C-alpha cells in the first residue's frame, strides 16, 4: 500500500510517499480500506516534532479516517467485511489501508459521504467534547469562538448553536466571517479590523462571555483572559498563532472563571464510552441537519504536504481531506 511516512522530525517537505506492507488485523482490530482521511493542524505539528506527543519514527500520521472494512480480527463482533465505517486512531490514517482498534470504529450511515465523515471526527468531536464535558455549555449562554472558519472553530459554531448558545464568531477576514455566519454564528467580530476586547464588552454589556473556545492562543488568548464573565470558562484548544501564552492567574481569581484544557486524543483513550456516546450524538445531529462538514478542498494522498501546508497556513474554511 501507499502511505505518507515521517522518517524523522523535520519540515513538512521531508515527508515521504512510500510503499509499506499492508496492515493485518490483530485481535480486536479491523483493517479499513481508507476512502478519506481528515487533515488537522496537530498533524503538521506532529511530523515536525512540535506536538505534545512525539511517537518513535518512522510513523504514518493521520488520526481520522472513513472507508470500508476489508478484514476483521479475532473477537470483533459489531463489524464485518464490507461495512462502511468511520474511525479514529492515534497514527496511521494517511495511508491506503489502516488497522484500527475496533472499539474506535463505528458504522457509517449511507447518507454520510466518506469525505464528510472523515472530517466529522477530530474537529467536531473536539468541539463537542470541549463544549459538553469540559465547559458544560448551557442553552442561553454566550459562546465566543476564535478561528471560527477553521475546521474545529466552525464545528464549535455549529455545535454551540445545536446546544442553544448565542455564538460570537471571531475571524481575521470578512470572507471567513461570512462562512461562520452561514454556519449559525449570531455575532461577527473581524479581529483584523475591530478591537476584540472592546467589542466583547459592548456585546455583553460589560459582563463578559460565558464560554470562550480559543484555538489561536498568543495575543488572542491574552485578550480573552480579560473577556470572560463571572463563572465563565476559557477553553484552551490550541495555539495556531504559534505562541503558547501565559495566564495571569490573578484574573481567574478576581473574575471567578475557570481555564479548561481540551485534549481530545487523551479523552478518547481515558473515557472511551463517553467518546462513543458523543460520536453517536454527533452522527444523529448530522442526519438531522444540526451539524455539517464544510469540505474546503480534497487532495490526493500523494499531495499530503500541500494539504497540511494549507491547514498550517490558516488558509482553510472548513476541512481539508485526503483521498487515497
Image (cartoon, rainbow, N blue to C red):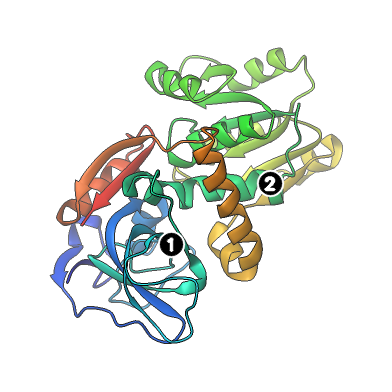
**Other residues around mark 2 within 10 Å, as few (<14) / some (14–19) / many (≥20):** some
Confirm whether residue 324 shows in the render.
yes
Locate residue 38, reporting x and y percent. 35, 51
Q: Is residue 194 toward the left or the right of residue 250 in the image? A: left
Locate residue 53, reporting x and y percent. 47, 68
Task: Please give the residue where the numbered disc 1 appears in the rendered image.
Answer: 87
Q: Residue at x 65, y 16 (%)?
A: 198
Q: Residue at x 80, y 40 (%)?
A: 257
**Other residues around mark 1 within 10 Å, as few (<14) / some (14–19) / many (≥20):** many
Please tell me which residue lies in front, 44 or 270: 270
Give residue 132's mark. 2
Q: Is residue 156 above or below residue 178?
A: below
Q: Secondary structure at mark 1?
A: strand
Q: Is residue 90 above or below residue 230?
A: below
Question: Quadrant of the rendered structure where residue 49 is?
Answer: bottom left
Q: Secondary structure at mark 2?
A: helix
Amino acid at each position: 500500500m501507499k502511505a505518507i511516512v515521517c522518517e524523522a522530525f523535520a519540515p513538512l517537505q521531508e515527508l515521504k510517499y512510500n510503499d509499506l506492507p499492508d496492515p493485518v488485523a490483530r485481535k480486536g482490530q479491523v483493517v479499513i480500506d481508507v476512502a478519506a482521511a481528515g487533515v488537522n493542524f496537530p498533524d503538521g505539528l506532529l511530523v515536525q516534532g512540535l506536538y505534545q506527543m512525539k511517537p518513535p519514527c518512522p510513523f504514518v500520521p493521520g488520526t481520522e479516517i472513513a472507508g470500508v472494512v476489508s478484514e476483521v480480527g479475532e473477537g470483533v463482533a459489531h463489524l464485518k467485511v464490507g461495512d462502511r465505517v468511520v474511525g479514529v486512531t492515534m497514527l496511521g490514517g494517511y495511508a491506503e489501508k489502516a488497522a484500527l482498534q475496533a472499539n474506535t470504529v463505528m458504522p457509517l450511515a449511507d447518507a454520510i459521504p466518506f469525505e464528510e465523515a472523515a472530517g466529522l471526527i477530530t474537529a467536531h468531536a473536539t468541539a463537542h467534547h470541549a463544549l459538553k464535558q469540559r465547559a458544560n455549555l448551557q442553552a442561553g449562554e454566550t459562546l465566543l469562538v476564535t478561528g471560527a472558519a477553521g475546521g474545529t472553530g466552525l464545528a464549535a459554531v455549529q455545535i454551540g448553536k445545536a446546544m442553544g448558545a448565542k455564538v460570537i464568531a471571531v475571524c481575521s477576514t470578512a470572507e471567513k466571517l461570512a462562512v461562520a455566519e452561514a454556519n449559525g454564528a449570531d455575532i461577527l467580530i473581524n479581529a483584523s479590523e475591530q478591537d476584540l476586547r472592546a467589542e466583547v464588552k459592548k456585546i455583553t454589556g460589560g459582563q463578559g462571555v460565558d464560554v470562550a473556545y480559543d484555538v489561536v492562543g498568543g495575543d488572542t488568548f491574552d485578550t480573552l483572559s480579560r473577556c470572560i464573565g463571572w463563572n465563565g470558562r476559557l477553553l484552551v484548544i490550541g495555539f495556531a498563532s504559534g505562541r503558547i501564552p501565559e495566564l495571569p492567574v490573578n484574573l481567574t481569581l478576581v473574575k471567578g472563571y475557570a481555564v479548561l484544557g481540551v485534549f481530545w486524543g487523551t479523552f478518547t483513550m481515558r473515557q472511551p464510552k463517553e467518546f462513543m456516546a458523543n460520536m453517536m450524538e454527533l452522527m444523529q445531529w448530522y442526519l438531522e441537519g444540526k451539524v455539517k462538514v464544510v469540505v474546503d478542498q480534497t487532495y490526493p494522498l500523494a499531495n499530503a504536504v500541500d494539504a497540511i501546508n494549507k491547514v498550517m497556513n490558516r488558509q482553510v474554511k472548513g476541512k481539508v481531506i485526503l483521498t487515497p
